[in-house]
Image (cartoon, grey):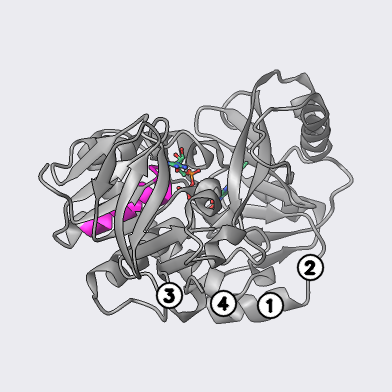
Amino acid sequence: MTSPDCIVIGGGAIGLLSAHFLVERGMRVLLLEKGELARESSWAGGGIVSPMYPWRYSDAVNQLASYGQQHYPVFLGGLREETGIDPELLPSGMLMLDEAEPEMWAWAEKWHARIEPLTSRDALDAVQPGLDPRFTSGLWMPDIHQVRNPRLAKALAARARHTQQIEIREQSPVAEIMLAGDKVEAVRLEEGEILSADCVLVTAGAWTGRLMPDACPAPAEIQPVKGQIVQFKAEPGLLTRMVMLNSRYLIPRKDGLILIGSTLEFEDFDKQTTTSALEDLQAAAIALLPALADKPVVNQWAGLRPGTKEGIPYIGECAGVEGLFVNAGQFRNGIVMGLGSALLAAQMITGEAPFLDPFPYKPT
Ligand SMILES: Cc1cc2nc3c(=O)[nH]c(=O)nc-3n(C[C@H](O)[C@H](O)[C@H](O)COP(=O)(O)OP(=O)(O)OC[C@H]3O[C@@H](n4cnc5c(N)ncnc54)[C@H](O)[C@@H]3O)c2cc1C
């Protein structure tokens, strides 16, 4: 590729989706990834297409989440057609076993979300049989979908590899974003190569803070927050709904695998899995669905979420640095918010009217 219109740093879901929307707007993109495409947080997540307890989040988060919920079905259908990889967007619904929270009803009305109280064990069983006998009521959110992260990641990466206007360079860690006065000028790779650029978009997830120059300090707030997930092997049909209690959730995949997630650990860039998390998550899973006591654990992994205080991502141009854009900090909700975040970033870069007010996401 002759010189690209924009360099995107970081090939997770946010970088891949952003590159897609930039190309749709006529740009040529160079995507730099320190390792392999989409093998970090975007691979490791649970894939719930909703924030957990969304009423606890600001409108800024809910707006981007709502965009994803509305547009993923068509977007992912197209992605499946194009790549032959099915990201398994499933309408599993979410059965919440926590007590109702007063704010949830106003939230549901505002965002047109269905929350149905289940007030008897029979009603619970009709939605999801086999839960622990101590549960006799719940809150059913039938509209919540899930997506299967590794498949989504693979499909996004496959499409990017087949897009002529995207040049991908893996194993290419960026060491520095170089400025000339108040403009972005180039990026320097760790191995020394310098690539000039008038437009740089940072989508480096949990690592974003490490890359931002002093002139753009706000996104340096982004810090890694480790999340561990444990996976059971069961027969398809044992669990068909997502189930949540006390910030722990079960997610049934189509082939019978069941995930229990996730921990929330503030431990710098450490991605080790731990025995204590395994025991804790396994116990939480069995306490929800006792049949899991007889099912083998077949996998455990960890990912680093791009953590921000309120989960509101930074999207847009850095104040005072022309040409330097960021799209990072989606924290626990980077899949559900990813589609809207990427569209907004591409609109900000190309000067198109944004589909929502970008003010809450300004990287200042
Ligand atoms: C356990 C867990 C459960 C989750 N569950 C959900 C959920 O149910 N629903 C939901 O919506 N979200 C969920 N999330 C959050 C979601 O996965 C993240 O918010 C999202 O994946 C962030 O995407 P990203 O592209 O910004 O980050 P990443 O996927 O981490 O991608 C960032 C990329 O940048 C690259 N990079 C970093 N530094 C450099 C550099 N210097 N040079 C070049 N490349 C670089 C990295 O290698 C990486 O590939 C979960 C996350 C975890 C860990």
Going from N to C along the chain, the mark reached first, 3 or 4, is: 4
Q: Between marks 3 and 1, how big is the CA–CA gap?
A: 38 Å
Mark 2 crowd level (few <14, some 14–19, many ≥20, 10 Å Cα): few
Q: Between marks 4 and 2, how big is the CA–CA gap?
A: 20 Å
Q: Is residue 97 left or right of residue 46?
A: right
Percent x, y of residue 207: 53, 46
Q: Quadrant of residue 189?
A: top left
From the image, tell me which residue sits under label 2.
100
Going from N to C along the chain, the mark reached first, 3 or 2, is: 2
From the image, tell me which residue sits under label 4.
59
Residue for point 59% across, 55% down: 331
Which disc, if any, is residue 319? Answer: 3
Going from N to C along the chain, the mark reached first, 4 or 2, is: 4
Going from N to C along the chain, the mark reached first, 1 or 2, is: 2
* For residue 350, above or below residue 302: below
Residue type at mark 4 is Asp
Pick whichever, 319 or 247, lies toward us: 319
Residue type at mark 1 is Trp
Dot in front, 4 or 1: 4
Dot in front, 3 or 4: 3
Residue type at mark 3 is Ala
